[in-house]
Image (tube, grey):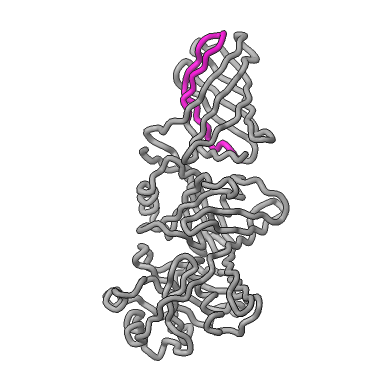
Amino acid sequence: MKIYYDQRVFRAKSNSSAGEVSGETVFEYFQRGTVLTGTYGGGSISQGQLLGNVNEGGSLSFIYQHLNAEGEFRTGKCESVPRLLADGLVELSEKWEWTSGKSGSGESVLEEFIPEVMKKKYFLLDVFTDRKFGGNQLAVFTNGGNLSGETMQKVAKELNLSETTFILPPESLENDYKVRIFTPGKELPTAGHPTLGTSHIIVSEKLKMVEGEKAELRLEQKVGMIPVDLELSSEGFPQRITMEAPLPNFLDIFEDVAQMAEVLNLQPSDIRLASPMQLVSCGVPFLIVPLNSLAAVENCKVNSVALEKYLADFPVTELLVFSTETVEGNSDVHCRMFAPEFGIVEDPATGSANGPLGSYLIEHEVFPVKEVNEFVSEQGFEMGRPSYLYLTIVMENDKITKVKVGGQSVIMGEGMMEIKS
């Protein structure tokens, strides 16, 4: 049985031969490895704590310690099997017995309720980098339970990072978690660096227990189930994380070179004519624009008036520009991504755009096509946040059969946000 707890708040009422006990208990970061912790307070319990373990088979063993209203120190023990309700809610029914203080035994039912103010823990990460202050920033909330989509959107806007994710119990128990992804302006069906950074937190914070040098996750997103592979250090920390993206769709072609040059504040001669400006999607569509040089990519500056004028009737306004001339010698492409409709002027690392880019490179034979094609894409240099994305495009019978996007990430810090229910 999988147990999905972060911070849970229960009201408890117990009856025993020793008298009634009532109060509130807060289970904080309930599954952190196999150690459970919690605190009691309120009602006839003045203060106390709870310690426990997850048993094989999914039951929980608790040891209670508390002072009652008369100042008597009590300890007790119980075993309970949690029942997972909708939206990650949990119900516990307990049979317990006191092991010190007044003798007696009894039963209690703990029903979860939503407090007036919920405390939600989050982590900050830099993704697609192996060092702090590089890559793309991300906030990951380890428990999105009891938050509406509207509230999640407000939280993402408050933090104002490229994306913010919320971890939820899965709809299918075959999968590990459900993940919702928000930019400051809208919810996304999938995205690269949020998927990788969220996977980092799931493993590093032991929201899923893994062993060995490799781990796999199955994450539910709006676009469907996303498989994620992790390479781990000897201490169990994520090193390289790789997600499998949906297969590409090659869509509309933007024909007017002069108009695109005006949108990007470039000369028409800066745009590469050997392959088209094409809309490509691996879950999220991006208009991919090939340029002739690194300097052209560096000089791009989106003209919002021209963007609105010339792309008003085009399906999207999200742009990824690239060149095969790069800053780093071991990189294959240098790119930038602009997404004003998402509330993102420019993104330092975009997994959901680099999957389509890798597919584009193969579809239009920008590089020689092999059975397994691997590229290093560099991004974010113009923003002072160098990022490296590792792309794998697998071909079979002249068709793309697999698209993978990988990279590294580092945890920058953590915090707690108080959110009214």
Q: Does residue 245 appear in this view?
A: yes
Q: Is residue 38 left or right of residue 307?
A: right
Q: At 50% across and 36% down in the image, what residue appears?
A: 85
Q: At 52% across and 69% down in the image, what residue appears?
A: 386
Instruction: Measuring from the top left, give residue 59's x and y in whole percent.
Output: 63, 31
Q: Does residue 130 appear in this view?
A: no
The magenta stretch spans which residues?
A: 10-32
Q: Nearer the viewer, residue 170 or 71?
A: 170
Residue 349's place in the image compared with 12, above or below, is: below
> Is 18 included in the stretch rendered in magenta?
yes
Q: At 56% across and 84% down in the image, what residue appears?
A: 365
The N terminus lies in quadrant? top right
Q: Nearer the viewer, residue 308 or 102?
A: 308
Instruction: Measuring from the top left, give residue 394's x and y in whole percent.
Output: 62, 73
Q: Quadrant of residue 311?
A: bottom left
Residue 16's place in the image compared with 33, above or below, is: above
